[in-house]
Amino acid sequence: MRDLSGQKRELGDGFSVARVLPQRDARTVGPFVFFDYFGPVEFKPGHGIDVRPHPHIGLATITYLFEGSQVHRDSLGNTQEILPGDVNWMTAGRGIAHSERTGPEVRARGHRMHGIQSWVGLPRANEDDPPSFQHAGKAKLPSREKDGVSMRLVCGKAFGMEAPVIVPMPIFYVDAHIKAGSSIVLEDDYEERGAMVVGGAVEAGGKRHEDGDMTIFDKGEHAQIKALTDARVMLLGGAPLDGERHVWWNFVASSRERIEKAKDDWKAGRFARIPGDDKEFIPLPEH
């Protein structure tokens, strides 16, 4: 068992983001190569999030909110408001650009923001697939409740459930609410398994874990999570990636050459523009 906590970075307006994956002691959990935990934060009226247009290759992004909302736009022409419990799965494949912003009505009234942005590496055979976008509302996600534990399956397969989002790899991602004194055991169907506490406190492996803590279980380990208080935990993992992945800025690829090409393409303006959000962009980092 390994325990991780993200290092928080302040982005202004009291908004902080903790990068949980990758870290030196844990680069991936199953296909998950990136895990950013943000909030909770109260945005005053007139304030919000503005992630300007930026590119991705070789991965799929998963946006999942506990509170607040975001407006997703991408270079395929999709515009989608993301609400708590919804799933946004954007496959970058050979290349896509997108932006994430607070909508005008939500920004005007002020709001509370709390959620997770994660990336999964695509299998080698799918790295250059055409980009695509899937959205599944909260009501469409399978759920179950038993013995003080309620679960909603975000994507993949787990606990006898299968999510509607089509995925190209063995993966599971579950939003679990556990009442104080109750517990859950992660199935050993998947080689790599983890748990991220996003509210309350739990015990795993004889240790206490609180909001913002991630536990990565060893292969074959009895992965029991007991709630010490009412708790909310994201369960995640799947099959390991089929080979090494290089991660640079917003790019994931099995070869450094592919990342170099993506860098050149973004710098030269060869990525498609985002309809309705084509006046700004995040420039390629110098380092």
Image: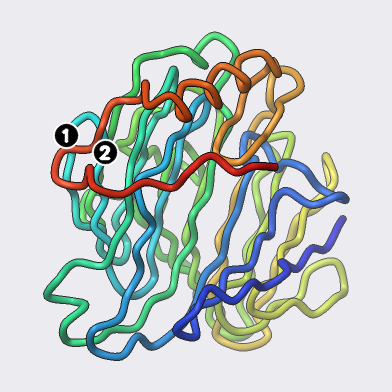
In this picture, residue 84 sits left or right of residue 250: left
Residue 101's tag is: none
Q: Where the C terminus falls, by quadrant?
A: top right
Residue density around tag 2, few if under 14, some if 14–19, many if 20 or more, within 10 Å? many
Q: Position of residue 202 (x, y in %)?
A: 69, 78
Disc 2, SS: strand
> What residue sits 62% from the left and 46% below the top?
34
Measured in 3D between alpha carbons, the distance from the residue under mark 2 to the one under mark 1, in whole angstroms, is 6 Å
Q: Position of residue 79 (x, y in %)?
A: 16, 45
Disc 1, SS: loop
| Tags 2 and 1 touching, CB below 8 Å | yes
Give the amino acid type for the residue marked by disc 1 in the picture.
Gly
Q: Nearer the viewer, residue 175 or 75?
A: 75
In this picture, residue 21 sits left or right of residue 82: right
Q: Position of residue 74 (x, y in %)?
A: 26, 38
> What residue sits 26% from the left and 67% below the top?
102
Residue 77's tag is: 1
Q: Indicate how the structure is coloured in the image.
A: rainbow
Q: Nearer the viewer, residue 254 or 66?
A: 254
Q: Nearer the viewer, residue 286 or 256?
A: 286
Give the amino acid type for the residue marked by disc 2 in the picture.
Asp
In this picture, residue 106 sits left or right of residue 282: left
Residue 74's tag is: 2
